[in-house]
Image: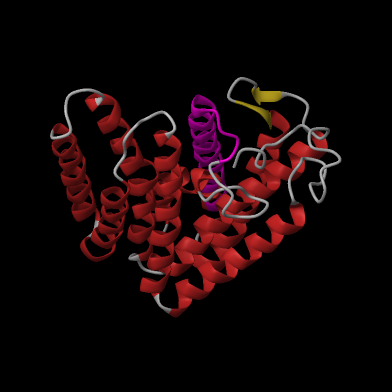
Amino acid sequence: MEGSAAEGNPDEGRGTPGGGRAGRDLPAAIAVGLLLGVLIVGSLFLVEELFLAVVVVAVGAGVRELVKAFATYDIKVPLIPVVGGMAAMVAAAYWGGAGWLVGTFAMLAFGVMAWRMFLGTEGYVRDTAATVLVLVYPSLLAAFVALMLDQPLGPERVIVFIATTVASDVGGYAAGVLFGKHPMSPVISPKKTWEGFAGSALACMLVGAWLIVWLLDAAIWQGVVLGAVVVVFATVGDLVESVIKRDIGMKDMGKALPGHGGLMDRLDSVVAALVPAWLLLTLFVP
């Protein structure tokens, strides 16, 4: 989400065709966002397994972007085993529960270490560390959406979570562009500001409070707490991806989504906020 949530440099990107004040192709971003929203909501309430297939495809594309990015530094991450492992974790979580998810991840992580052993000792720690990183972020974290979906009112929980996380992006973008003055992390992500973060927090808490009451019949304060926690983890997830991109010298992970960048540029905050959101919704709506 670099260049979106909590963004706060209005002058950067002026004059870019269709880019708006913050250098983002806003019409394309809105169109893509709406299409993604229709796809997510439609699959959620049509066939849950179809939604999980959408998740696997999207996260798989994000994994591919990370693998290609690491390859520029000659870091070897096996694409097919990692994507297959991610799909296995999603299936294990949905049909087996948290125990099966943890067990599947542990076997995958050990399998990676065993696989790399046969390719020689040079770069062993580097390659296995990068592969396990990709197995965790975004793969393991994304699999928690299957745990959320398998709970009572599963589709409604997912909608509450996704809408609250998207609100972080929208609120941060608007507040950052309009009012952004004070950089949040100049070294990691210069365009993110504290004013943008405040906009993200306000939007998250408002949307969380509204939807948790409407869809899950929970209390307003619980939605406010959910929004406050989501915005923190979403922002940190965004910054984690920014660190990775800066380390390997990339602006965007890809160009798959016009106006957004790559899949990982959309998934960074979502997967980071999934686990705490799952925990809170489990606590608030047993």
Question: Residue 204 appears at what percent x and percent y?
Answer: 61, 48
Question: Residue 172 appears at what percent x and percent y?
Answer: 68, 42
Work out whether 10 lies above or below 56.
Answer: above
Q: Nearer the viewer, residue 115 or 196?
A: 115
Q: Nearer the viewer, residue 38 or 234?
A: 38
Locate the N terminus and report the quarter of the image it occupies. Answer: top right
Q: How is the model colour-coded?
A: secondary structure
Of all residues, the one furthest to the bottom in this rendering is 46
Locate the C terminus and report the quarter of the image it occupies. Answer: bottom left
Of all residues, the one furthest to the right in this rendering is 15
Work out whether 195 lies above or below 256.
Answer: above
Q: How many marks?
A: 0
- What residue sits 69% from the left and 55% below the top? 29
Of all residues, the one furthest to the top in this rendering is 187
- What residue sits 19% from the left and 50% below the top? 104
Is 140 one of the magenta-colored residues? no
Is 230 one of the magenta-colored residues? yes
- What residue sits 40% from the left and 45% below the top? 138
Question: Residue 278 appears at what percent x and percent y?
Answer: 39, 52
Can residue 286 be seen in the rendering of this structure? no
Magenta stretch, overall SS: helix
Q: Nearer the viewer, residue 152 or 95?
A: 95
Q: Nearer the viewer, residue 284 or 42?
A: 42
- What residue sits 27% from the left and 62% below the top? 91
Is residue 56 found left or right of 100 in the rendered image? Answer: right
Q: Which residues are magenta?
A: 223-252
Work out whether 152 lies above or below 24.
Answer: below
Question: Residue 234 appears at what percent x and percent y?
Answer: 53, 41
Can residue 223 be seen in the rendering of this structure? yes
